Amino acid sequence: MDPKQPFNELPTLPPPGDLETRDLLKACIEAHKALASLRQATGHLPNPAVLINTIPVLEAQASSEIENIVTTTDSLFRFASHAEAADPATKEALRYRTALQEGFQSLRQRPLCTGTAEAVCTRIKGVQMQVRRVPGTALANQQTGEVIYTPPVGEALLREKLANWERFIHDCRDIDPLIRMAVAHYQFEAIHPFTDGNGRTGRVLNLLMLVEQDLLDQPVLYLSRYIIERKADYYRLLLEVTREGNWVEWVAWMLDAITDTARWTGAKIDAIRRLHEAAAEWIRAERPKVYSRELVDVIFNQPYCRIQNVVEMGIAKRETAARYLRELVDIGVLQEQRMGKEKLFLHPAYLRLLSDGSHAPQQYRHLQERKH
């Protein structure tokens, strides 16, 4: 095939050949076990809001970075509730988080479909996105500028291929759902239905498919972390499917990605649970009159807390809520900061745990000793 010519002959799904080889089925078993363990870990968290407020933010950061949209974990959490004040890269990454959450909610109304993809891409880009109607989209090597792939063109053809993509996801139930997800991800990227935002949209759809197939309860698999660490392999294997039909290696890579990521995410969630328990014990010991389970939950919703967050939870009125948070500053749990006219209370141990690759939570006693 000529990479400069539209790949209108992109084969329909399912792919030819056997995708359920012995090795791939063994990899599927490991991936399913890892996802089941992750699902179990999510059920052990004392505050379920932690998941939807944190892991998708990490996923948003990494998925955006794959597309060279770079921001920091600190910025994402700092502006999570006030995105309008953020820099452009942070705004765009936060839109990814919102797209993931809205896509998750949409599964209650309709199955995964072209309309889901259009809604997700629209939210990510911040403008109305529909299946492209004009030619001119091509993928190029970032270093050399050489065109390496030109996706199909023509709205009718694109919608036809997307309809086949939908049918494959929902109807080919004789194929393991994780293999289906890997194949569907390649096909979506090869169709490349939008003028921009296809990669991030495709990665959101991966997580939504895992939820739809009842493999996860919430879209909290931090899959983009694995991809960004192996970005060259990710793009190489996608291209090898196009040029050589190398489905087996692509599917094997994706199954490894799911297994590794599920284990990593589960370990992160377990570390959050242990940090939550440590914070509760420290606050109860140092400030028993301030302690409540609800207050601990508030400071774990995300690493930046506002006085209004405490008020909205019905824990205390504004003046008392402010005093409670300052008490937590005094014992080394929080740090008071200003953002414009507003006071923010940063939970440093929590932000560090979310930002770092390690899963070792800090001890609050050590933070307090360091403060003094």
Image: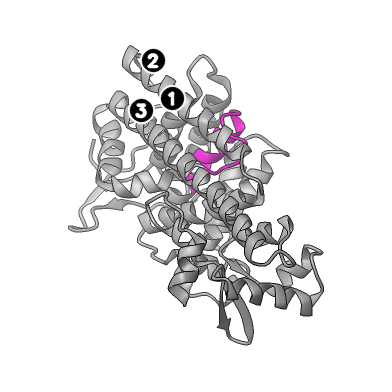
Q: Residue type at mark 3?
A: Val
Which portion, as a residue range, is magenta?
201-220
Residue nearest the viewer, comparing 72 with 67: 72
Whichever of labels 2 and 3 marks the residue nearer the N terminus, that label is 2
Question: What residue did someone put label 1 on?
Answer: 179
Residue 19 shows in this picture: no
Disc 1 residue crowd, few under 14, some 14–19, many 20+, Cα 10 Å: many
The residue positioned 47% from the left and 55% from the top of the image is 58
- Quick one: SS at disc 2? loop
Would you place residue 24 above or below residue 278 in this image?
above
Please, what is the dominant secondary structure of the magenta stretch?
helix
Disc 3 residue crowd, few under 14, some 14–19, many 20+, Cα 10 Å: many
Q: Is residue 358 magenta?
A: no
The residue positioned 42% from the left and 49% from the top of the image is 359
Question: What residue did someone put label 3 on?
Answer: 251
Q: Position of residue 124 (x, y in %)?
A: 53, 58
Question: Which numbered tag is attached to residue 20?
Answer: 2
Q: Mark 2 and mark 3: span between their CA atoms?
A: 10 Å
Q: Mark 1–mark 3 contact, CB under 8 Å?
A: yes
